[in-house]
Amino acid sequence: MNDIKLGDVTVTRVEEMHGPLMPTGAFFPTVPDEVWQRHEAALTPDHLADGIVHAAVQTWVLRSEGRTILIDTGVGNDKPRPAAEFWDHLSTDFLGSLARAGVQPEDVDLVVNTHLHVDHIGWNTRLVHGEWVPTFPNATYLMPRPDVVFWDPANNPAIAGGVNENAFADSVVPVLSSGQVQQWEGSHDIDANLRLEAAPGHTPGSSVLKLTSGTDRALFAGDLVHTPLQVMELGHSSCFCEDPRAAGNIRRELLGWAADTGALVLPAHFSGHGALEIARDADAFTIKQWSPLSRL
């Protein structure tokens, strides 16, 4: 099952890829081995195996108030990613998977990039006759303004040589040039069911999307968490977090909202069942139950 209904909103999970990503110590430098070992039973095999963090790259497709909305667009095909060999010049069937979910590129009304990291913007564009063009020609692309500023190499030369090298040029600039980007900051109401909120830390413009529809609540968490370990051990941020302390603070705040409201938490990168409900557990949280979505 790849679909769930939350109030008046239908949510569909569309996978680009999943599997081993990075060694635990490289991905989470502040997490001692004994902490991974303490939670090994809860993490293995979907999220951890042989000292390697497993993760998914996926898009959440929302159908709300008659519109088709994509949350994050993965890595993309044909993209030059010299600092991330596992994502360099990919050739995946993501658009085929999207079609099997009933969505053609022309059907998409809105694309939400929760932040502008390389693995959240890749399918913003595709290569056509040697040119990067918007993949979703009829969509408005919602991008957080602080990330548009931060990830522009003209403002941040340090991007050269990092995992985001080339990403702004091939996955952001073409949609800026097409006039399809709407920048926002602070918060942004999409419709009566969906609201974007700033969640800085992982990147300056990182955001989450809250769903409130009928009695259902959901938190599309972006990169608030990369592994369930961060639900149970709140103080640890990934090596890709620009401000680890701020990332930890906003993680505690937003997971607290999810626990207190019974919201389903849908991170960008959880494999397995992909989404979960959590409960407060002393000074952190515990996994209450996983979603009914099929395991990756």
Image: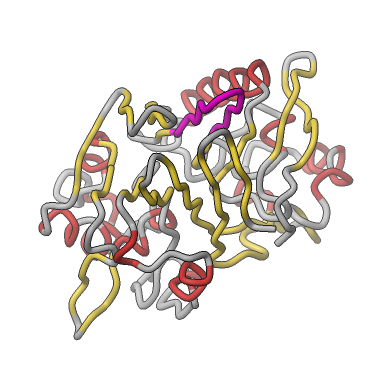
Seen in the picture, residue 164 relative to 82 is either above or below; the reply is above
Q: Nearer the viewer, residue 41 or 94?
A: 94
Q: Which residues are magenta?
A: 208-219
Is residue 113 covered in magenta?
A: no
Image color mode: secondary structure
Q: Residue at x 67, y 23 (%)?
A: 262
Where residue 190 sits, quadrant-wise, is top left
Residue 187 x, y percent position in the rendering:
32, 24
Residue 57 x, y percent position in the rendering:
54, 59
Residue 2 x, y percent position in the rendering:
64, 57
Dominant secondary structure, magenta: strand
Seen in the picture, residue 235 relative to 34 is either above or below; the reply is above
Q: Residue furthest bottom?
A: 129
Seen in the picture, residue 135 relative to 152 is either above or below; the reply is below
Q: Nearer the viewer, residue 160 or 261?
A: 261
* Residue 198 relative to residue 44: left or right: left
Q: Residue at x 47, y 67 (%)?
A: 98
Q: Quadrant of the C terminus?
A: bottom right
Where residue 172 sits, quadrant-wise, is bottom left
Seen in the picture, residue 126 relative to 195 is either above or below; the reply is below
Residue 203 x, y percent position in the rendering:
39, 37
Q: Quadrant of the N terminus?
A: bottom right
Q: Residue at x 73, y 55 (%)?
A: 272
* Residue 129 relative to residue 102: left or right: left
* Residue 196 relative to residue 86: left or right: left
Q: Residue at x 45, y 80 (%)?
A: 91
